[in-house]
Amino acid sequence: MDKKSFSDLNLNPWIIRQCATIGVKDPTPIQYHCIPEILKNRDVIGAAKTGSGKTLAFALPILQRLCEDPYGVFALVLTPTRELAYQIADQFAVIGKPMNLKHCVIVGGMDMVAQGRELAKKPHIVLATPGRLADHIDSDETLNFSKIKFLVLDEADRLLGGHFDEQIRTIFKVLPKAKQTLFFSATITETLEKLKETIGTDPFLYEAPADVATVEELDQHYVLTPQDVRDAYLVETIRTFRSKNTSGNIMIFTDTCKKCQILSMTLNEVGFENVALHAMISQKERLSALARFKSNTVKMLIATDVASRGLDIPSVQLVVNHNVPKIPKEYIHRVGRTARAGKGGMAITLVTPTDLKSLYAIEERINTKLTEFKIDDREVGKIFTQISVTESEAHIKLDEKDFYQKKLINLRKKWILEGLDPDEEEAKLLKKRKSKKKKQKKKGNKGHNLNKVKKSVAPQI
């Protein structure tokens, strides 16, 4: 296919100039296929690999239509994560600067009253997570979305995967029937029929032609590790990578908020400066952590899957899966944080014997065999005791009452909805945690008896 330019897509010259200011000079395949169809007023379903330019595929035509008939609220963009909402908002802001674009971000963890004031100003673009927007709709009858022209569901497979169904229904009730609906994701094919049913029209469908779900520039490996030595293997994996790649950012994905926090504390203690990003810290802390990582102030980010969707950080050279994702598409989203926009990158997954089934499912889904990333087992043996004891101390230091306060509130709501006694369920949970904490403390004391000498295991970064 001949190379196409943005001018071939009937975009206004000012939009093309704004794209050039952020280094975007030529459209990606999903952009030159979807933008003309959106400008023809068609509903669109777009599926392409992570890092393929999906955000601009819907942002550019929306801004072009907006400049022809500017009013608020013109478009609503829904995303599954708060960080992705802010990132998309930044791209809208940069491209829409010449037309004095007004936008607002409506996500959890921020002041609802201040958000209500922003919505009352009728911004052109509203970017939101479903839960918080549904809260505003339920609490404010004056909110009016009856004139929106566009509804965008970014990471549509996640939004329509069942977790947000109630909130999505609340939002859809206040939206007009006459609107363009745009769905984008990297793994959209699995919910394709549900998407078509949701739209109710004959949408334009674009699926990027590819035999693999990950980009060719991504170098994918595994490290075999026993279950109880996983964190020592993680540290040695990072050290081995850093011995040959002294620059570039590293993202490490974990499966739970607590593990994310413990791992962050442990790695900071042994000399790998990092920031954590998970649902159990405040939104301001999450934005601060992401800003420090994006600006290269800190070169390592430990995160849950809250950071696996859509985040575009060009400096990421390595993604490490501390655990093997149970669902192959989550692996695709995680490793998609590197090797973006034609750049190279590496992904390393720590694999225990019990993870082999999940690993084979991932390899089948991506049509690629992961190769072994060689590390020195003897070096792992040297640092194992230090890592183990440091992690035990992190467990002890973590004030579980404060850390779990937010989660406990949400759990009590869930128990009430399920018809259970929240006091009884909380008592069971606290008893279980107390027993676990006692075991961790015993393990930590045993480590102290080794009279270990603390020192950094990290190379100079």
Image (cartoon, grey):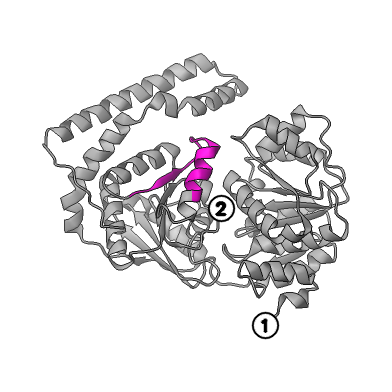
Which residue, given by chain and number where applicable, does mark 1 sit on? Answer: 3
* Residue 279 part of the magenta-drawn span: yes
Rendering coords of residue 295 (x, y %): 48, 55
Q: What stretch is highlighted in magenta?
A: 273-291
Residue 362 in the image: above or below residue 83:
below
Residue, x 53% and y 44% (percent of image)? 287
Quarter of the view holding residue 203: bottom right
Local packing at callout 1 (Cα closer than 10 Å; few below 14, some 14-19, many 20+) is few
Marks 1 and 2, the one that precedes in the sequence = 1
Relative to residue 319, is residue 166 drawn left or right? Answer: right
Which residue, given by chain and number where applicable, does mark 2 sit on? Answer: 309
* Residue 351 part of the magenta-drawn span: no
Residue, x 31% and y 33% (percent of image)? 395
Question: Identity of the amino acid at label 1?
Answer: Lys
Residue 388 in the image: above or below residue 238:
above
Rendering coords of residue 419 (x, y %): 60, 19
Residue 453 in the image: above or below residue 344:
above
